[in-house]
Amino acid sequence: MIFATGMAILISVFPPQERGKVLGINVAAVYTGLSLGPFLGGLLTQHFTWRSVFLINVPLGLIIISLILWKLKEEWADAKGEKFDFIGSIIYGVSIIAIMYGITLLPAIRSLWLILLGITGISAFVKWESKIENPVFEITLFRTNRVFAFSGLAALINYSATFAVTFLLSLYLQYVKGLSPQGAGLVLISQPIVQAIFSPFAGRVSDRIEPRIVATLGMTLTAIGLFLFTFLDENSPVVFIIARLIVLGFGFALFSSPNTNAIMSSVEKKYYGIASGSVGTMRLLGQMLSMGIATLLFAIYIGGGQITAEYYPAFIKSVKVAFIIFSILCFGGIFASISRGKIRINDTKMTASGKEKPPI
C-alpha cells in the first residue's frame, strides 16, 4: 500500500519540470534509510537480539501514522466511481504467491510446479484484464506505451541483479572475513550512502536531458560494479569491496530516480497510482528473483548444511557464480534501458497512448 501510493502522491503535487528533482529527493530518503539500516540492524542484533529489529518499527510506525493524519490533507481520485476488479486481483495475488513460494522451495521438484502454476495464472490475469471495462491493472500501458514497458522491464532487471548483493556480502564479511554484524553493516553502508548523495543530482539531471540516457549510464556502471565482484575470493581486501560497492551505489543512483521519472512521466494523471504500483511491483518481484537466484545457488553448491569453514570454498564459488549471473542480467538491462524511447520530443511530453502533448 505504501509503495503504490507514496510516489503517486508526490508526483501529483509537483509540475513535470520538477518531477526528477522530487523523485531524486524521495530516492535519497529511501537510501538514507538503507544506509542506516545495515548499521543500526547490526547494532541492534549484536546488543539486543534480532527481535529488536522488528520491535523498533512499532514506535516509528506510530510516529509516521500520526504525521500522515496531521499533515497529509489533499489527495486525488480520478478513477472514483469505477468498479473494483476483485476477480483480477484474486487471480494476480494467487499467481504471485505461487511464484514466490515456489522460488523459496527451489530446487525441489514441487517448486517448479508452483512456479508453472503462477506463470499460468499471470497469463490468465493478462487475458482477463484485457477484456473487462475497469481492470485493476491497465495492461494496455505495456502494449501501447513503449517508455512505460521498457522502463518497467529495466527496473525489474536492475533489482533482480542487485538486491541479493547485500545479502551475499553480509554473509561473506561475517563468515569469511570474520567481521561482526555491526562491522559488516559499516562496510555495507558505503553503497546506500553514495546512492543517497547522488540520487537528487541524478533526478535533477533527468529533468534536463532524457531520463533514458542517465538511467542507461547508471545501468552500465551497475553492470561494471557487479562484474568486478566476480573476482571476489577469500583474500579480497575489505577496501576493494568498499570501492566496488561505491561503484554500484553510484550506478544505482544514476539509474533509479531517472528510470522512475521516465515511468511516471509516460502516463496520464489518472494512471499515477498504477504506475507507482508498477514500480513497487517490479522492485519487489526483482528482489524476490534476486534472492531466489542466490538461495538456489546455495542449495546447489552448499546443500542444506550450515556455512562452516569446510564449506567456505563452496560458498565463495556460489557467490562468484551469483555475481556472474547478475552481471549478465544487468548487461541485458542496458539494452532494455536504452530501447525505451524518448519522453521529450521537441519539448513535448508523451501521454500514455504514445501521443504528444505540450508540457504543463
Image: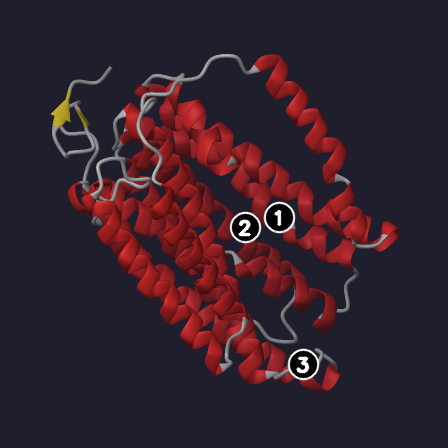
Q: Can residue 214 be seen in this view?
A: yes
In the rendered structure, find residue 41 and report the number of the disc placed on it.
Answer: none
SS class, disc 1 = helix
- Earlier along the polypeptide chain: callout 1 or callout 2? 1
Alpha carbon separation for disc pair 1 and 2: 6 Å
Alpha carbon separation for disc pair 3 and 1: 25 Å
Circle 1: residue type: Ser
Q: Residue 272 location, x and y as percent? A: 34, 29
Outermost residue toward the bottom in this view? 310
- Earlier along the polypeptide chain: callout 3 or callout 1? 1
Disc 2 crowd, CA 10 A, few/some/many (<14, 14-19, 20+): many
SS class, disc 2 = helix
Q: Can residue 346 be seen in this view?
A: no
Disc 3 crowd, CA 10 A, few/some/many (<14, 14-19, 20+): some
Q: Residue 151 location, x and y as percent? A: 30, 45
Alpha carbon separation for disc pair 2 and 3: 26 Å
Which residue is label 1 attached to?
190
Asked if labels 2 and 1 touch by Cβ distance under 8 angstroms, the answer is yes
Between 123 and 248, the one nearer to me in the picture: 123
Between 145 and 235, the one nearer to me in the picture: 145
Which residue is label 3 attached to?
312
SS class, disc 3 = helix
Which residue is label 2 attached to?
246
